[in-house]
Amino acid sequence: MDLNMNFLTITRWEFENTLKSKKFLFIFLMQLSILFLLIVFFNSFAANMESEEGISLTPSLVDFTTLDIEDRGGLFKKYVNPEIINIISSNGNNSLSRTEKGETGGWFKVSPDSIKRIQNGEVVDIVLYLDYSDPRRSVIRDEVNNTITTMSAVLTKEYLKSADNQNTSNTTGVTEEKTGESLPIQLIRKVMLSVLLFLPLFLFGNIIIDSVVGEKERKTGEILVAMPISTGEILLGKGLAVVAISALQVAMWIIVLIGAGFTIQNVIQVYLMVVFTAIPIVGLTSIIAAYSNNYKEAGIGISAAYIIVVGFLIVPALTYISRNSYSSNISPMTVVMRLFAGESVALPEMLMAVIFILLMSVVTFKIATYLFERDDILFGPRPGPIKLILQIFHIKKR
């Protein structure tokens, strides 16, 4: 595909005309309104989940997994969240064997003299054994870390209160406190924020449909083909205009989300990854638009294609949450979720998503250009999907 800089002229023309369109401005404002409504709904949803009454919209996490705890002092055991982990008291005789057999998710061992050590200001030894064949191990690890953090905060507070009384001989004054968000809320917040960040990429398919399919219905495609510019430049120019508009909306959505109280770390990396993901989505939409004869066909095709794309984005992200799978990083949503949560993303993990996006971008725009160059698809009669696929792969139908 021999391209020069002519496509930038088309990009600038499409971008300026889209921004001047009253239809676009109306859709843009409606989308921002939807974002505000989603934020309000989510905040209400999170508040109800953390309330005493709770809600019944999601499955219960009670007894989500089990954990053997050997804690003679009983102090650590009381801080583990029973709504997530089913606690099984252990004397240490068979807990390791139970963990190896998969009968329990892990074994949490605390020094038998933990209370005495705490009273003397000494370090308490704790050991956590996990069954790494169990995908729920990350839930146990996170809950144990939350338990230790909560207990440390409580003990520090009690120590400061009793600094003038060094003869305290028991820990009956310790009261349970909750710090931070519960694990279910943390998981929901990650998934919800990921969906909101990628949502703008699926809201501008109508621009491509109007730009490509509209050329066919208005019979202006012949004029574009007759111009001294390649079809590759035409599609690339139109596609980049949509990517630029998506980038503008993603930037506005990030600003709104941060203003609404969402914590987004590594903002620049998150923004670039989301915008980069828009390129193959625009390419896929261009394929459907180039093949469709009218708006109805294009709308049906895009709806089916976007369902597949959303599934590809979300399923690996959910898989990573449950089992920290390395291969899940092929989805840019997984990488974005890790970035805005402040996790360290290794270069190979980042490149996995970037290379996949780049590959799909080249493939989708190549196919879209191939379709747009064919007179039978642009002017008719158009070949059927099966016949077209056979022609693309140079397979003769018997």
Image (spheres, rainbow, N blue to C red):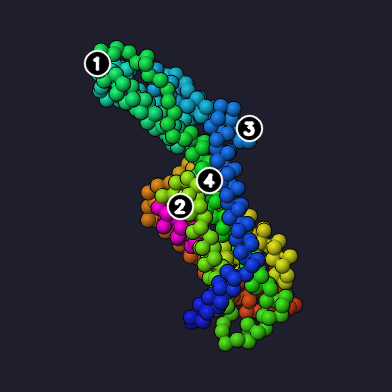
Labels 3 and 4: the sequence-earlier one: 3
Labels 2 and 3: the sequence-earlier one: 3
Q: CA distance from mark 2 to mark 4?
A: 12 Å
Q: Nearer the viewer, mark 2 or mark 4?
A: 4
Answer with left or right where residue 379 lies relative to residue 126: right
Stretch of the chain drawn in magenta: 266-276
Query: How many numbered callouts?
Result: 4
Answer with left or right where residue 138 lies relative to residue 115: right
Disc 1, SS: loop
Q: Amino acid at mark 4?
A: Val
For the C terminus, give its image quadrant. Answer: bottom right
Residue receiving disc 3: 56
Does residue 93 appear in the picture of this structure? Answer: no
Residue receiving disc 2: 335
Would you say the magenta stretch is mainly helix, strand or loop? helix
Q: Are marks 2 and 3 in contact (CB under 8 Å)?
A: no
Does residue 201 appear in the picture of this structure? Answer: yes
Labels 2 and 1: the sequence-earlier one: 1
Q: Amino acid at mark 3?
A: Ser
Task: Identify the residue at image location x=44%, y=18%.
Answer: 89
Q: Could you tell me residue 149's position as x and y percent?
A: 37, 31
Q: Which mark is residue 191?
A: 4
